[in-house]
Amino acid sequence: MKPIALLRLVLAPLSAGALITGLSAQTAPAAESAETIKLTPFAVTAEKSSGYKVSSASAATRTNTAIIDIPQTVDIVTKEFWDDIGATTFDQSFKYVANVYVRNRNAGSGDGISLRGFEIFGGSMSVDGVRMGNNKRDLVGYERLEVVKGPPSAVQGRAGGTGLLNYILKKPEIGLNSVGVKYALSFDEYDAVTNRAEFDANYSLKGSTKLAARVAGSLQDGDDYIQFQKTKNYALYPSFKWEISPKTDLVLAAELLDFNTPSREEGHGFAVYPEKMRRLIPRFNDPADPITALGLPYNFNISGPGNEEKTKVSNATLFLTHQINDWLYFRQVGHMRYFSNNTFAFTGEDNTRTTVNSQKTGSVGWRRGSTAQGDLVAKYSLRDWLTGTTMVGYSYDDGANENSNFSGIPSAPFNTLSMVAIKASGYSASYYNGRVVPTLARTAYTENDSYSYGQFIQQDVGLFKNRLLLTGGLRSDHEVTETRNKLTGLRASGANTTLNSYRYGATYKFRPDLALYAVKSVQNDAPNTVSRYNGLIAGDPRLSEFFTVAPLTELNEVGIKGEALQGRLSFTVTYWEMIRVGSTVNILANGISQGQNVTFGTVSEIPGAQSKGYEITAYGSINDRLSLIANFTDMEVSQGFTGQQNTAGWTAASNPGRIPLRFAPEWNLNVFGKYSFRDQQSQGWEVKAGVAAVGPLYTQLTGFGLTLLPDNQYSYDAGAAYRWKNYNFDLMVTNLTNVPFFITRDQAPRTYRFSVSAKW
């Protein structure tokens, strides 16, 4: 029997009838044992990782639920693992996660990944289960990351459709007084140096068992591996906890960021200039190719200085959790946020010529929002063979934003940039002295207002002493949006929609540590009005062209979850099929706008995109000394024809009228392990190493569209750490072989990171 046929067979009896039956059951509480754990449904940070294993998650169900009981793939990345690999940023937070890759390391607002072959933007991030919008972030303030594969909206609301990244903030611990500090120095093959300092302090009021405060923060100042790109970031994460009573907790957590980072990676990614990267692409791996023949260095940046994104973020969230009685729990969340950006960059992209057109683009804007979210959870037992959990909740979100886009052409001779001349100058910043943009015209000026109200219900039923678990969820959202063109004063677009999403599934436990599961999850999102063109000069009539898409995602998944080695190691074997309509793709090309040569983007809808395949994942510890993360994915993807030429290497006969998804490797593999030689006082050495690998994939190249990268790619990391008393000394070397690892954007060259930390 094919996997999808098995999936349908398992899911058939679990439709609306099972959900309605569970909801109509009597809710009289059964006698609870004395071992009832206070605030269990919401205490998502109470559990510490063991090795790299965490046995519960909150993002897929909205409550703290054992991963083996969740009929959907959820990958967990812990703070311990981040520390081991030296991760500090958004793009590093999901390194070594199966089939998840950064969409763009710097550009945008920190939100953008490729997950199971689909590109996720807008709303695909949340913090402690609350959608907060897209922004760059610093991992010093977070405890862990939960990655949900597939639509999560039956409980989480509007999201990125094909997945959700849920970050868990650090919270105060009552009864603990501790201070941790860390200094890290990193440098790469091109003498880019970064200094970073971190601190994390937890304080409990003397003599009190009810109050605690915590503050974590960082300061980072340094260079990116790409020329002329610098970073200077400040991050602060204060939080406060008050245990009002044994059954009531109040937590206030905030995120304050002031970032100045690169806004894009000129010459890397879609525009492939460095020789090492061009050698990966057959059409460029040719001595006759004029750019490849230049032998441009790996850190090459044709656009020069002037690329930066200044962002400020202020988020604050209040969590009130109350255990009404032994079987009824309540949580209310209130959240406020503000984000501002000031982003400008010089661009110049052309994969065919050594002299390219130059343009300055930028945006200035802000957004603010507030969210109220409430959950009521009832846990009960109707018979010794029948248990249930009913969760109902709501969310209200109100937001507004304003954004201005700008574009202009530098004066001659900088209206074009010559790679030959830049190389002759020694790649010097002085080459760009005197560059000015006489007119930086506004190409767009928009204001958006929105509000939404969502309500949901989730019903879980446990049969035969929880050997068979049935789950169903239904969510309805009403959204109102309006966009106004502030240049003309006219209403550009608007929507008033009611959307319904649902999920149902089953888990059968052969044993407490081994389960078979199946799930169907469907999410539809509000219609989205999209600008057809971008990157054009102000006044170009094409800038006023828009079109509307109606996103919809359907996931069918079946798998086995289990725990091995006396519970130290968790594993999952999963087969999925996911279909997505209403997605968009931006195709870059070179052309004329207002009489100027520019590189511009054309946005088109992807008809009927789909991915399917299987994942094998294991994480945790083999024994007390060896911790491990390992996963393998085999995947097949395709999409409807979007107006591009049929792609070379794609088997048109077996896929008539379809082309592949970009940035979706045929297979990928990740393995990372850490072995400890430390004594019973946790002093001594640890060694660690990892490998990431991807198979052939299609990438997008400016001027060429989809292009096959036929060869497998590998990246290796290794390091060691030594702990003496309260001090830990750590050396991590990433990209040991100093080769490109080109999927969506390229990774840094060989980089050395040395850190020393202490905790009291």
Image (cartoon, helix red, strand yellow):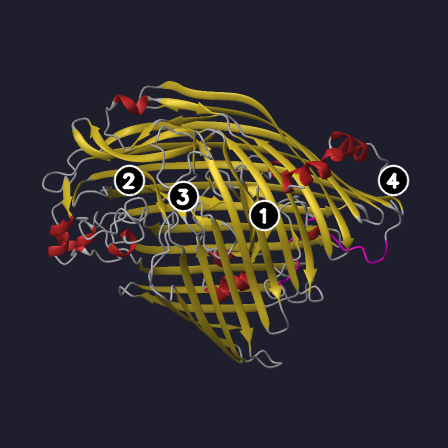
Is the magenta region chiefly helix, strand or loop? Answer: loop
Q: Distance between the Cα atoms at labels 2 and 1?
A: 38 Å
Q: Which residues are magenta?
A: 33-49
Give the labeled residue for mark 3.
109
Q: Distance between the Cα atoms at labels 2 and 4?
A: 63 Å
Q: Position of residue 424 (x, y in %)?
A: 11, 56
Which dot, 2 or 4, sits closer to the camera? Answer: 2
The amino acid type found where label 4 is placed reads: Ala
Mark sitting earlier along the chain (4/1):
4
- The answer to whether residue 536 is visible is yes
Q: On the rendered image, what quadrant is the C terminus found in?
A: bottom right
Give the labeled residue for mark 1.
128
Give the labeled residue for mark 2.
702
Q: Residue furthest top?
A: 490
The amino acid type found where label 3 is placed reads: Ser
Q: Position of residue 715 (x, y in %)?
A: 41, 61
Disc marking residue 28: 4
The amino acid type found where label 2 is placed reads: Thr
Residue 11 sits in quarter: top right
Q: Distance between the Cα atoms at labels 1 and 3?
A: 19 Å
Left or right position of 84 against 69:
left
